[in-house]
Amino acid sequence: GLRKKEVNVLCLGLDNSGKTTIINQLKPVNTQAQDVVPTIGFNIEKFKTSSLSFTVFDMSGQSRYRNLWEHYYKQSHAIIFVVDSGDKLRMVVAKEELDTLLNHQDIRSRRMPVLFFANKIDLRDAMSSVKVSQLLCLESIKDKPWHICASDAVKGEGLQEGVEWLQDHIK
Ligand code: GTP
Ligand code: MG
């Protein structure tokens, strides 16, 4: 059959938001890790959808590693940005990191799709994806297609919807 198109995706967001858990769930079952641990630096992971072959740079969200993110902007075709919907205190930090990302010279001028996961919606005091998108001011993103999905990465809920949107919006 036809070779799938290869795309690079950067997975960003604060530490503990659930990035590695999400990417792990998207990998083929036989390659999934049993335990997810905090990422040191970054990991490179691969998974396929019906039409695309994804290479994901799963970055650490710890503050000491966030300066690594920008080195991978140029080579990326899309961004997955993960937020912990239960972490009200750090939503402002997540917004600061998002704003810095969107204003970066290697990102600003490009029409690359940005997929947001409002993750950990299973938590009892989790904010809705509508609330998360308001706090992050997503409506002000005019130069890129974006989409937000509520997810529970531990159960794997909401992830397929997001990846299908990504597949449809990567050129
Ligand atoms: P860094 O690698 O440090 O940047 O963190 P990360 O964003 O990769 O987070 P990780 O996937 O390591 O998950 C952090 C913790 O949150 C783990 O204990 C996960 O099991 C948990 N977690 C991830 N997604 C969910 C979710 O949807 N719901 C709940 N309740 N816990 C989750
Ligand atoms: Mg991680």
Image (spheres, helix red, strand yellow):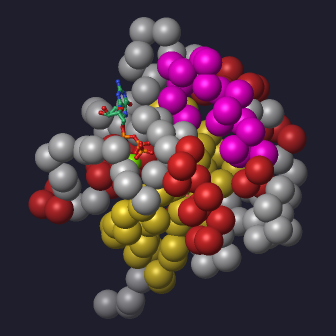
Could you say where residue 15 lies in the image, as x and y percent from the top left?
48, 39
- Identify which residue is drawn at 47% across, 57% down: 59
Asked if the magenta segment contains residue 95, the reply would be yes
- Identify which residue is drawn at 32% across, 39% down: 156
Q: Is residue 57 left or right of residue 70?
A: left
Could you say where residue 137 lies in the image, as x and y percent from the top left?
80, 33
Q: Quadrant of residue 166?
A: bottom right
Residue placed furthest toward the top = 124
Residue placed furthest toward the front = 64
> Of residues 65 and 74, which is closer to you in this image?
65
Q: Which residues are magenta?
A: 83-99
**Figure check: 17 above or below 74:** above
Q: Quadrant of residue 43?
A: bottom left
**Taking the image as drawn, is residue 124 in sight?**
yes
> Of residues 81 and 104, which is closer to you in this image?
104
Could you say where residue 20 lies in the image, as x and y percent from the top left?
36, 49
**Taking the image as drawn, is residue 159 in sight?**
no
- Identify which residue is drawn at 86% across, 41% down: 140
- Identify which residue is drawn at 42% across, 61% down: 42
Could you say where residue 125 lies in the image, as x and y percent from the top left?
49, 9
Asked if the magenta segment contains residue 170, the reply would be no
> Of residues 92 and 111, which is closer to you in this image?
92
Q: Report the label total.
A: 0
> Of residues 36 and 41, which is closer to you in this image?
41
**Figure check: 123 above or below 42:** above
